[in-house]
């Protein structure tokens, strides 16, 4: 069974490649890239900050084999998507995802979000619950109190190495990685900022997934989110970190499929 706990393979080779098909949707002059694979109930994959949809290379085949349609999106400013140099926001990322659903004629989709992608999923669920079958919320906070003080590690460094390689290869602006990262950090320092009442008003099924050794998110914060969102479930993933989807994909995929199998699309 594949395992890459220290991310040596991720840094050197990246995950398995996505299927070759992909398209762009123009969003007021900003082209947002997405891949649309398979048939069945729709699942949006929303990646983490500085990454791209290819980071879900271990997840896409598992979802297709299970009979799901996969919509993998490069957030604006990431991967193949354009960026106008403006500020980022999770609400903006959520609006882009909604526009892609509209473009594809998809009424409802589940959203599997990793880190920043999880925040995107919750933003979409708050704004348009009728379009969201459920949110798999992995490795993200809902306010500033949920984050650990940042400490650079070799594992984080290898992830960053991969992100830089991918950005240089994929982005229409390959020299703008540092500018993108700086703008992203502004968003991450100030967003999201959900109150207890905000969380209590969420009206879609949510699974909060927390990695046992997450470098960024406090365990009590993940438990707080799961307690506060009505009906939410908490799933703890042992022996992995913030990078579980590429460290032990079989474990991560099992949790995602368990979440999806319980949804009514």
Image: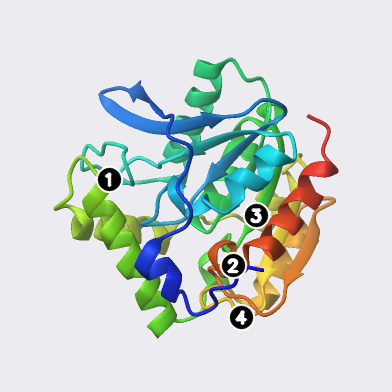
Left or right: 125, with 31 as reference point: right
Mark 3 is surrounded, within 10 Å at the Cα level, by few (under 14), some (14 to 19) or many (20 or more) other residues, namely: many
Query: Of marks 1 and 2, which one's residue comes earlier in the chain?
Result: 1
Q: Which mark is residue 216?
A: none
Q: Which mark is residue 213?
A: 4
Q: Are marks 1 and 2 in contact (CB under 8 Å)?
A: no
Left or right: 114, with 34 as reference point: right
Q: Which mark is residue 244?
A: 2
Residue indicated by mark 3: 137
Q: Are marks 1 and 4 in contact (CB under 8 Å)?
A: no
Q: Give the image location of residue 110, x and y in percent.
A: 68, 37
Name the mark nearer the viewer: 3 or 2.
Answer: 2
Which secondary structure lies at badge 2? helix
Query: Of marks 3 and 1, which one's residue comes earlier in the chain?
Result: 3
Query: Of marks 2 and 4, which one's residue comes earlier in the chain?
Result: 4
Name the mark nearer the viewer: 2 or 4.
Answer: 2
Query: Of marks 1 and 4, which one's residue comes earlier in the chain?
Result: 1
Q: Give the image location of residue 147, x and y in percent.
A: 52, 73
Q: Give the image location of residue 27, x and y in percent.
A: 34, 24
Mark 1 is surrounded, within 10 Å at the Cα level, by few (under 14), some (14 to 19) or many (20 or more) other residues, namely: some
Residue 150 visible here: no
Q: Which mark is residue 170?
A: 1
Mark 2 is surrounded, within 10 Å at the Cα level, by few (under 14), some (14 to 19) or many (20 or more) other residues, namely: many
Q: Are marks 3 and 2 in contact (CB under 8 Å)?
A: no
Q: Are marks 2 and 4 in contact (CB under 8 Å)?
A: no
Classify 136 as above or below 237. Answer: above
The Cα atoms of the two marked residues, 1 and 4, are separated by 30 Å
Q: Quadrant of residue 1?
A: bottom right
Which secondary structure lies at badge 1? helix
């Amino acid at each position: 069974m594949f395992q890459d706990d220290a991310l040596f393979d991720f840094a050197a080779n990246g995950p398995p490649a996505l299927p070759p098909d992909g398209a762009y949707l123009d969003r007021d002059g900003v082209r947002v890239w997405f891949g649309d694979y398979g048939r069945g109930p729709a699942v949006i994959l929303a990646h983490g900050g500085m990454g791209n949809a290819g980071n879900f290379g271990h997840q896409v085949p598992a979802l297709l084999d299970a009979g799901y349609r996969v919509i993998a999106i490069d957030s604006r400013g990431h991967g193949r998507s354009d960026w106008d140099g403006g500020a980022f926001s999770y609400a903006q990322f959520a609006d882009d995802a909604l526009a892609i659903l509209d473009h594809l004629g998809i009424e409802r989709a589940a959203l599997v979000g990793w880190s920043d992608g999880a925040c995107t999923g919750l933003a979409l669920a708050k704004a348009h619950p009728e379009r969201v079958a459920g949110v798999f919320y992995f490795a993200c906070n809902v306010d500033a109190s949920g984050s650990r003080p940042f400490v650079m590690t070799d594992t984080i460094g290898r992830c960053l190495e991969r992100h830089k390689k991918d950005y240089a290869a994929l982005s229409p602006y390959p020299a703008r990685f540092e500018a993108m990262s700086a703008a992203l950090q502004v968003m991450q320092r100030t967003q999201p900022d959900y109150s207890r009442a905000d969380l209590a008003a969420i009206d879609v099924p949510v699974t909060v997934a927390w990695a046992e050794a997450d470098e960024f998110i406090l365990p009590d914060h993940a438990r707080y989110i799961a307690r506060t969102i009505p009906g939410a479930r908490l799933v703890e993933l042992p022996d992995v970190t913030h990078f579980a989807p590429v460290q032990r994909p079989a474990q991560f995929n099992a949790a995602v499929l368990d979440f999806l199998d319980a949804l009514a699309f």
